[in-house]
Image (spheres, rainbow, N blue to C red):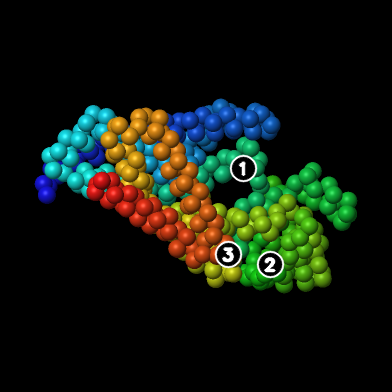
Amino acid sequence: MIKLSKTLSLYLGKNYLLNTLAVLTALLSIIYLLDILELLRRANKTGDIPLGIILQMGLLKLPEIGQTIFPFAILFSALWTFWQLNRRSELVVLRASGFSVWQFLAPIVLLAALIGALQIGLINPAGALLIGKYDRLESEFLKKQSSQIALFKEGLWLRQEIDPDKQQSFKKTHNVNLAEGYIILHARKIAHPSWQLLNVTVFYLDTEDQLLMRLDAKSATLEKNLWTFNDVLVNSNQTPPTRLPAFTLPTTLTIKDIEDSFSSPQSMSFWNLPGHIQTLRETGFETGPLIVHYHNLLAQPLFLMAMVILAATVSMRPPRFGGTLVLIASGLFIGLGVFFLSSFLQALGASNQLPPPLAAWAPSIIFILFGLSALIHLEDG
């Protein structure tokens, strides 16, 4: 078997890389324009927002969206590359020169794996950092939410705005005048599944960051738009310390909001995921979705390799088997199959109906085995 030269490997890799960049740029440009239109629509509802902020928010979101469309960009760029080589009869020349499909496929497969490794080590951490900044701008200008939640080994930390104008019902029901400001809540432990916070401390501050009140409670519960603190010591700057059996504060949060904030992987870097998963496990929270996401990232190089192999199965056939329309239809069919099977298995893993690592790795293994068997059949045929 003749060895593929370095020059030929670089030629194939260069063609594929340029096509990948072109496809990725086209897809991201379309998504960016659509996202800008959506942000402008939302901005019209909240008041005047500088156009520069809207454009910046769209750019900040691109790396996170880019990771979602990476497999499809890899798939379609591979289809395009092999179609070009086939159309120019370069594949025929390579085969006639004694090269097997495995030899001229190898540089492109390895390049796809390298792109996957780059996504894990660089693009994902950068995307997590930028999406965090996007969330802050969204909260500031589009007023999506006014709460911030974090979970550490020391317990739960939560920051929540107190806006009297939005909480008139609480004032009427409890006959309490609330000052505008925010609370910082710290719970050292969380009891599951009752979702009761234990050993709770709350700091109530005004808009000038001046302390208005401190609460030290044995426990707290969240239900019906209320924080209810039990066996609580109230320290106010206007009254002496008082111990009460219960004390309530309004909230717009729900238990689902808090749980979703912990399991959302978008703002979590790949390098920080293992520690965060361990913290969630120790505090009793559901870790299935994050474990699936973590192993999805680990499997990304293998998954992108599978996309190249699948593309080769339909685009390396002789031109007589169909033209451009057949190629596009094949690409769309493969893309839909990849999306639905991957989503289905990941949903099973997130709900623990399948072991999360298996749910994350299974699509890559299935697609590679299917692609290799199809290529072997193509070679023998």
The residue tagged 1 is 139
With respect to residue 142, does 51 lie above or below? above
Residue type pointed to by label 1: Ser
The residue tagged 2 is 195
**In the image, residue 259 lies at what x, y percent?**
62, 59
Label number found at residue 286: 3
**In the image, residue 64 lies at what x, y percent?**
47, 44
Of 215 and 332, the residue lying toward us: 332
**In the image, residue 171 lies at what x, y percent?**
85, 51
Crowd tier of the residue under label 3, counting other residues whose Cα lies within 10 Å: few below 14, some 14–19, many 20 or above: some
Of 259 and 300, the residue lying toward us: 300
In the rendered structure, the answer to whether residue 195 lies left or right of residue 285 reads: right
| Label 1 to label 2: alpha-carbon separation | 26 Å
Q: Which of marks 1 and 2 is nearer the N terminus?
A: 1
Which secondary structure, mark 2? Answer: loop
Front disc: 2 or 3:
3
Residue type pointed to by label 3: Glu
With respect to residue 175, does 26 lie above or below? above
**Based on the displayed image, in which of its 4 quarters is residue 94 positioned?**
top left
**What's the residue at 76%, 60% (across, down)?**
223
**What's the residue at 38%, 41% (across, down)?**
75
Q: Residue 178: tell me if it is visible.
A: yes
